[in-house]
Image (cartoon, grey):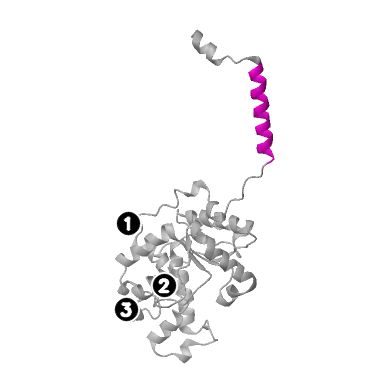
Amino acid sequence: MGRFVSFLWIRPGMKICIMLTLSLLFLLSGCTSPPSTPPEQRRSANLEEAFRESPADSFSIAYVTGKFDPLIHSAFTTILPEHANQSGLRLRADAYAAFVEMFTAAKQDGIQLRIISATRNFERQKLIWEKKWTGATLVEGGIDLAKTESDPVLRAKRILRYSSMPGTSRHHWGTDIDLNHLENDWFEQGEGLKVYTWLVEHAASFGFCQPYSPKGTDRPYGYEEEKWHWSWMPVARSLTRQASTLLKDEDIQGFLGDQTATQIGVVEHYILGVNNLCK
């Protein structure tokens, strides 16, 4: 015991030296600004668990095809007004937490992100699809497909340029969001170009990927490019795999024009026709 006490004893002169040294170090540390953290490292530690991919067998066919109500589903939450252009939008809570992290990082860099569309279940997608099918909603170019396209397959393919068949949309999953604007041209100049450039450089560090990249040899099928559409991959990747193993074209039914799903090969060409980085 005596040895332990003598080990802790410090001569008075040494105490003063130690205290002065510690005080100097404290003052120096207080005058030094911490280095800025790049967006890639801003994701907080509490998201690490959420970034683990969901097991592929945790989703039913009903979930994959959007046949549930996101207003009462326990995995979903309401997007706050400061993050969206309208009230009442819903998203998976884990995907939303990741978006909030990305939103904050983007804001620190002078970039404003705004969710303009989030979860759409089967019934909501059916409404969008059937309005275009019947001509109640005109497609790009102001065209009424009910009057100009009598061939069901060609009519469906025209809608499929930018809108999904009910049961096949990634927006069913609660992992996908549309940001800021619904025109590619907007993201190619001015503020839109700044937003898109930031997303391309930083979104992946928060788990987000652009599923509808430019079409070409790497992505010959699927929807046209959508610079505004981003998927939260820790869950969306599992759902893509689930769709590839569970869904068949004949399962896509229950809406006007559904007979075209098998003729078009909608599962392979549209559900799976995404950016390879998002698979």
Query: In the image, 20: left or right of 80?
Result: right
Q: Is residue 176 visible?
A: yes
Find the distance from the CA under tag 3 to the CA under tag 2.
14 Å
Query: Which residue is found at the position 37% from the left and 64% from the top?
Result: 240
Mark 2 neighbour class, 10 Å CA radius: few under 14, some 14 to 19, many 20 or more? many
Query: In the image, 74: left or right of 101?
Result: left
Find the distance from the CA under tag 2 to the CA under tag 1.
22 Å
Residue type at the position of mark 3: Thr
Q: Main secondary structure of the magenta part?
A: helix
Asked whether 274 or 161 is in front, the reply is 274
The earlier-in-sequence mark between 2 and 1 is 1
Query: Which residue is found at the position 49% from the left and 10% from the top?
Result: 3
Residue type at the position of mark 2: Pro
Image x and y of residue 48, in percent: 46, 49
Residue type at the position of mark 1: Asp
Query: Which residue is found at the position 30% from the left and 71% from the top?
Result: 248
Q: Of the residues tagged 3 and 2, which is closer to the observer?
A: 3
Kindly check if marks 2 and 1 are in contact, taking CB atoms under 8 A apart as contact.
Answer: no
Any mark on residue 57, and which? 1
Q: Which residues are magenta?
A: 13-31
* Residue bearing the label numbered 2: 166
* Residue bearing the label numbered 3: 262
Image x and y of residue 115, in percent: 57, 64
Any mark on residue 15, and which? none
For the residue labelled by badge 1, is the local secondary structure a helix, a strand or a loop? helix
The earlier-in-sequence mark between 3 and 1 is 1
Kindly check if marks 3 and 2 are in contact, taking CB atoms under 8 A apart as contact.
Answer: no
